Amino acid sequence: MPRYQPQPSDRFTFGLWTVGHTGRDPFGEPTRAPLSAPEVVRLVAEAGAAGVNFHDNDLVPIDASPAERDRIVRDFRAALDETGLTVPMATTNLFSDPAFRDGAFTNPDPAVRALALQKTMGAIDLGVELGAETYVFWGGREGTEVDAGRDVVDGLKWFREAINYLLAYCADNGYDLRFALEPKPNEPRGDIFLPTVGAMLAFIETLDDPDRVGVNPEVAHETMAGLNVTHAVAQAWDAGKLFHIDLNDQNPGRYDQDFRFGAHNPKAAFHLVRFLEGVGYDGPLHFDAHAYRTSDPEDVKAFAAGCMRTYLVLKEKAEQFAQDDEIQALLAEVTGTDDAQGAGLVGPYSTDGAAALRAHDFDRAALGRRGRPYERLDQLTTDLLLGVR
Ligand code: GLT
Ligand code: MN
Ligand code: MN
């Protein structure tokens, strides 16, 4: 088998909207013809992916008749059966239609909030019908440009009401679906509510059934917020909330780029892969990215293959990192304690322990003299990533 050839067991997935992206942007018309859902399925299956994800309207147009819906779903299912691809995740488009111009679940108009719930229940039915186990909520329009226009606490209350309603809908219908909330700081709104993984994690605890709700961190979104995505993912993992992940890349301070995974910051991508592989994350590895507007259909295939190849290369690099004696020795040096000063002083609180700690005589100057070889560690990491190690 060729090196870095993705297999279904690698759990790589693509959204219909990613590989099917036509190159349209706020300044320009499409540069590529649209692909039908079965065409996307065949393309990503050939490239070695395990599954595809979709928004309701990526698959079924918003105005489709019931007969059209059934035909589209039948053709899609036939392509899935033919290729063996699965649908691990589904979601709702609550951002394209003008009705949602001022938000969906957080729209001040209760009629729009009700429409958003109705649309999402239909989309959940569709996702469950096709085997989805995770349902993503990305609140693209849930935000503001004008702070005078919205009480943020109202926005949060309405968002909570919507998620609680939909949790109850799933319970009522016996759907074993987990929800994954996806934060993003801005675009397409000036500011989007619950802008980071940390904010989402805190919000989840206020829901009626928090155990069924986790997060879907996206590399580009945390990067847009100026944050370290691996730290965000680690916090989600620590909270037992890493239900899904959107892999792509982003240059901070730019527009919402959704670049091929690892295209901009391979070192950050390496640390993310090293984390995911190290902790044994076993959910889908979803590429929420799209090819450059300059790409032709052949180049779109290269884009899809590139996302997966980079992940697999970085996974191999992570193994190399773990087996590198010099790197491991430096890691032991930076993480270990080099003297007896700290031994036995920290741990769970006890009255006696606290008294002993209060009485302990630290050699603070000695602690302050101890350097950390992070330059050496990072250079070895850089050498390893650049292929000279
Ligand atoms: C849109 C967004 C993504 C979300 C998708 C799911 S849609 O492409 O930019 O980050 O994951 O709604
Ligand atoms: Mn994005
Ligand atoms: Mn995403």
Image (spheres, rainbow, N blue to C red):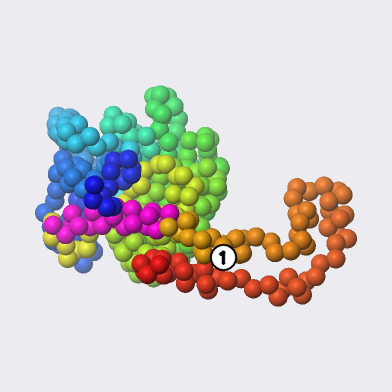
Q: Which residues are magenta?
A: 298-319
Is residue 35 or residue 260 the one in the foreground?
A: 260
220 displayed left or right of 300? right
The residue at the far front in this view is 325
Q: Position of residue 56 (x, y in %)?
A: 26, 40
Q: In this rendering, is residue 171 above or below 184?
A: above
Residue 181 within the segment the image draws in magenta: no
174 displayed left or right of 310? right
Q: Can residue 85 be seen here?
A: yes
Residue at point 82% right, 47% down?
Answer: 350
Residue at point 33% right, 44% down?
Answer: 10
Residue 307 within the segment the image draws in magenta: yes
Quadrant of residue 340 in the image?
bottom right
Q: Main secondary structure of the magenta part?
A: helix
Location of mark 1 (residue): 330
Is residue 210 or residue 347 the one in the foreground?
A: 347
Q: Position of residue 37 (x, y in %)?
A: 18, 42
Q: Can residue 162 be seen here?
A: no
Quadrant of image for the C terminus: bottom left
Q: Secondary structure at mark 1?
A: helix
The residue at the far left in this view is 33
Residue at point 56% right, 62% down?
Answer: 329
Q: Position of residue 49 (x, y in %)?
A: 26, 44
335 displayed left or right of 35? right
Quadrant of residue 78 in the image?
top left
Q: In this rendering, is residue 374 above or below 287?
A: below
Q: Position of residue 246 (x, y in %)?
A: 37, 51
Q: In this rendering, is residue 46 above or below 170?
A: below
Question: Which amino acid lies under the numbered mark 1 shown in the image of this protein?
Answer: Leu
Packing grade of label 1 (10 A; few <14, some 14-19, many >=20) is some
